[in-house]
Amino acid sequence: MDEFVQSLRHPFPPSVWKQWIRQLLPSLCWKCGGVLGGKTYHDPASPFLCLSCLKELPWMDSQYHCRQCGNRTAEPDRLRCSECMEEVWDLYESRSGFEYTDLIRDWILRLKFYGQEHLAPLLGRLLALNFQNNNWLEKYDSVVPIPLHSSRLRKRGFNQSLLLTHHFSKNLVEYTHPIFPHWLRRTRATRPQTELPLAERLVNLDNAFAASPEVQNRSILLLDDVMTTGSTLNAAARCLLDAGADKVGALVLCRRMWDASDNLYGEA
C-alpha cells in the first residue's frame, strides 16, 4: 500500500502564488495536527493531510475484494463471492476507496450527522486519489449520486452523496463525467437502514426510487458515501435498469466489511 500512496499525485498542484500564501498561513494536517510546510505543497492530499497520515488511512486493497459486492475476499480478483451469490444483484460491479473504520468512519459520521460540511472536500479528494492511476472510470458515461428523500434532506440540510460526488469529480483530472442528480429520486421515505436488521434491509427499499427517462442507454455510475449490504445501491440500480439504463455500477467512499455471522447494524 505504501507503493500505491507513493504513486499518487496532487490533482492540481498549487501555483507559486498559493505556495507563498501558504508559507504565511500554513495548513495543519487534519489527522495529526502537524504543520504542512513548504515540502508538502505537492503531496497528493495537500492541504488536508501530511503524507504519513495519508499512508495510515484504511485504504481498500484493490485485489482482495469481490468485484460485484465489494466485500473482502480471501482470494484475489473474485468476480462474485459466496455472500453475494446468495442474493440477486442488479449492480454490474462496485468499488470502494477505503474500509469503513478508524478516522474515515469518524469523518463520515461528522459530515452526515453533525453538519460538518467542510469535510466534504477532503473526502472527495481521497476518493478521487484512488482512481487517478487507472482507467476503471472510462466504462461509465454518467455519474448519479444516491438521493435523499425530501423529508430527510430538509432535516439534514444537504445530501452528503451529492457533496461527495461534486468534490470527487472536481479532483479528477483525466476522467471527468457529467453529474446528473435529477436522474434518480426517492419517492418513499424509508426507515434508515442503520435501524434495521439484514432481512428487513433487503426489502425496506423496494419501490423507493424513481428514474428519469433520460437514463436510457446510459452507463451509469452510482456514487454514495458508505456501503454495507449494498441494498440501497442495488435497489437504485434496479430502478435505473428498469428505466432503460444500459449498465449500472457503484462507487462508494468506503465499504463496511462483513460476513454472514455479522449482525449488520450500521451505515447502509
Image (cartoon, helix red, strand yellow):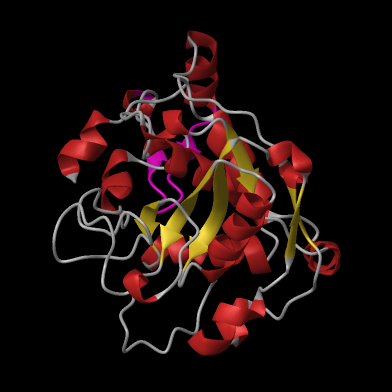
Range covered by the magenta-colored residues: 25-38
Q: Is residue 46 visible?
A: no
Q: Residue at x 30, y 39 (%)?
A: 51
Relative horizontal placement of residue 91, taking residue 81 as reference (left or right) = right
Name the one closer to the observer, 121 or 146: 146
Relative to 91, 67 lies left or right? left
Check the image and name the residue furthest to the top: 16
Q: Is residue 117 visible?
A: yes
Magenta: main secondary structure equals: loop
In the image, taking residue 253 as reference, residue 54 lies left or right, namely left
The answer to whether 100 is drawn above or below residue 45 in the figure is below
Q: Quadrant of residue 206?
A: bottom right
Q: Which residue lies at the image location 42% right of the left edge and 74% below the top edge?
A: 87
Q: Can you give x and y, in whole percent of width and height, for residue 230 in the image?
A: 49, 67
Foreground residue among 114 and 126: 126
Q: Residue at position x 31%, y 54% from top?
A: 67
Q: Is residue 127 left or right of residue 55?
A: right
Residue at point 25%, 48% (across, down): 62
- Nearer to the camera, 214 or 115: 214
